[in-house]
Image: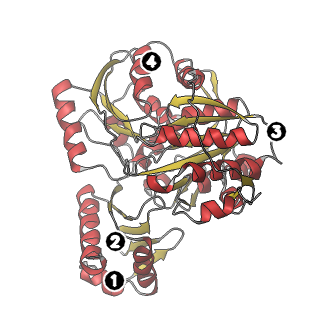
């Protein structure tokens, strides 16, 4: 018994914590025993609620992900639980197949964060784990034997095929006929799926910039380089749209015919309108054009993170026939079954990149034309990297007590209102908004600004982060 390890103790000794979606940490912290401890604690925390003998695994393209999957599988073996390994596929593809099979699953991915970090996303047979489940994993005292050897994993393509069929069967074979689509592949986990799927619906597809090294695309903080790339690609190829995702394929990144990347919440707003969704759950950071559009019967705002969005679905479903959610990063969560093209589209209550893309691209109007009808509210966002969480919390707490001196340094006078649902969201007297919060996934301070003009929102983000950097950044 002395040779055995306790899950909670192994987890507590490392720097791996749960963020807005899954456990995240440095690759060096995800040792084989840590991966096994998380996996075993996860299974032990749900096995009284669900009956299963197999857990599904999949990974993104990070260099560290395969070995982590091997460690998870080895931990499951100690519980006499089988593993089905789906290889490199998007997170929603894994989640969809596992939910169809009433099976738990684990996605090994760090999403958009740099490749020196990674993570584990856990799904019960009925969907993403809750915040309560996270605590149960952290506190589970199950015992296991330290891992010695890691076994080779054999890839099944069943999840990939199920995910492709979900959308290939929903739309007609000519749904994208006449559309020229660029796919920015980089190192996305779905890059081997997207081209064939878009082509199967009739689109003319051009693959763009596939990378053999991991590229940490953040759909909420698109780099100036990627912004210019999209404009150049659009001008060169005459695309109707450019499609991409983050690293694990659950957050979409879509550019219009001019090569301008859409904000994720605007994409979600348009997708929800086209799906005739009645009620929405969205994080507090999303654009207020959602309520101002009057497209929806009810909108509830939550903390940032898919578990908070999903937690609202059950109650909303009692009063409304169609329920969905999305985040400012673009990830779309379908909370109820809906009918589209006289076909049933099953709920997928986890972030998905494909549904909003197909909903926009199968319309007769261009993306720019679809956007024209929306209320004139623009959001910009960016982040300060390597900004410790404790410094973010210190700054936010200081501003909560009195933001006037900080706002004066920005040249802003007058009364303001605050919202502390997640971080600090300040509404100025002219209706502009400034929202600051620490990232849940990395040592970063995120800033979102909203205004009636796009250049003002972008300018405010730069001013705010510039001031924070001058006043609080570690030197």
Would residue 176 appear left or right of 30 to someone viewing this image? left
| Gap in angstroms between the C-alphas marked 3 and 4 | 40 Å
- Measured as percent of width and height from the top left, residue 385 is found at 32, 63
> Which quadrant is home to the N terminus?
bottom right
> Is residue 173 visible in the rendered structure shown here?
yes
| Gap in angstroms between the C-alphas marked 1 and 2 | 9 Å
Which labelled disc corresponds to residue 414?
A: 1
- Measured as percent of width and height from the top left, residue 26 is found at 44, 56
**Pick the front one: 63 or 149:** 149
Residue highlighted by disc 4: 175
Foreground disc of the pair 3, 2:
3
Tell me the crowding category of disc 3: few under 14, some 14 to 19, or many 20 or more residues within 10 angstroms, Cα based.
few
Query: Are the residues tagged 4 and 1 within 8 Å (C-beta)?
Result: no
Which labelled disc corresponds to residue 430?
A: 2
| Gap in angstroms between the C-alphas marked 4 and 1 | 51 Å
Residue highlighted by disc 3: 51
> Which quadrant is home to the C terminus?
bottom left
Would residue 282 appear left or right of 253 to someone viewing this image? right
**Pick the front one: 208 or 433:** 208
| Gap in angstroms between the C-alphas marked 4 and 2 | 43 Å
In the picture as drawn, the residue positioned furthest to the front comes out as 2
**Residue sitting at x 54%, y 69%:** 421
**Residue sitting at x 31%, y 82%:** 406
The secondary structure type at the circle numbered 4 is loop
Foreground disc of the pair 4, 2:
4
**Pick the front one: 304 or 362:** 304
Mark sitting earlier along the chain (4/2): 4
Q: Is residue 418 above or below residue 347?
A: below
| Gap in angstroms between the C-alphas marked 3 and 1 | 58 Å
Foreground disc of the pair 3, 4:
3
Query: Are the residues tagged 1 and 2 within 8 Å (C-beta)?
Result: yes
Tell me the crowding category of disc 1: few under 14, some 14 to 19, or many 20 or more residues within 10 angstroms, Cα based.
few
């Amino acid at each position: 018994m002395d040779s055995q390890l306790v899950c909670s103790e192994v987890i507590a000794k490392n720097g791996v914590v749960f963020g807005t979606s899954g456990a995240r940490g440095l690759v060096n912290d995800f040792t084989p025993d840590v991966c096994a401890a998380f996996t075993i604690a996860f299974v032990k925390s749900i096995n009284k609620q669900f009956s299963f003998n197999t857990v599904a695994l999949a990974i993104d393209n990070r260099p560290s992900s395969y070995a982590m999957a091997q460690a998870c599988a080895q931990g499951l073996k100690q519980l006499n639980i089988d593993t089905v390994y789906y290889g490199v596929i998007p997170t929603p593809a894994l989640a969809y197949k596992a939910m169809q099979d009433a099976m738990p699953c684990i996605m090994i991915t760090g999403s958009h964060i740099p490749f020196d970090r990674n993570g584990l996303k856990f799904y019960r047979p009925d969907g993403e784990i809750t915040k309560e489940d996270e605590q149960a994993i952290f506190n589970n005292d199950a015992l296991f034997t330290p891992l010695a050897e890691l076994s080779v994993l054999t890839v099944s393509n069943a999840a990939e095929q199920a995910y492709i069929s979900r959308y290939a069967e929903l739309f007609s074979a000519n749904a994208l006929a006449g559309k020229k689509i660029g796919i920015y592949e980089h190192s996305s986990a779905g890059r081997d799926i997207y081209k064939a799927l878009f082509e199967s619906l009739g689109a003319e597809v051009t693959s763009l910039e596939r990378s053999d090294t991991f590229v940490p695309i953040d759909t909420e903080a698109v780099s100036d380089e990627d912004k210019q790339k999209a404009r150049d690609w659009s001008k060169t190829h005459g695309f109707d749209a450019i499609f991409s995702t983050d690293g694990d394929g659950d957050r979409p990144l879509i550019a219009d015919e001019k090569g301008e990347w859409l904000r994720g919440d605007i994409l979600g707003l348009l997708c929800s309108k086209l799906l005739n969704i009645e009620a929405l759950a969205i994080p507090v950071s999303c654009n207020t054009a959602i309520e101002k559009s009057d497209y929806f019967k009810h909108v509830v705002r939550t903390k940032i993170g898919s578990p908070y969005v999903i937690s609202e679905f059950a109650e909303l479903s009692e009063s409304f026939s169609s329920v969905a959610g999305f985040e400012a990063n673009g990830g779309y969560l379908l909370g109820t079954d809906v009918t589209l093209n006289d076909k049933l589209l099953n709920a997928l209550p986890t972030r998905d990149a494909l549904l909003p893309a197909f909903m926009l691209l199968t319309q007769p109007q261009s993306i720019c034309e679809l956007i024209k009808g929306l209320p004139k509210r623009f959001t910009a966002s960016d982040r300060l990297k390597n900004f410790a969480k404790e410094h973010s919390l210190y700054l936010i707490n200081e501003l909560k007590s009195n933001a006037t001196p900080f706002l004066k340094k920005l040249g802003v006078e007058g009364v303001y209102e605050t919202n502390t649902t997640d971080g600090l969201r300040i509404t100025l007297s002219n209706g502009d908004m400034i929202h600051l919060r620490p990232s849940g996934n990395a040592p970063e301070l995120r800033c979102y600004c909203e205004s009636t003009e796009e250049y003002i929102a972008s300018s405010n983000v730069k001013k705010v982060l510039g001031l924070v950097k001058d006043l609080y950044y570690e030197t």
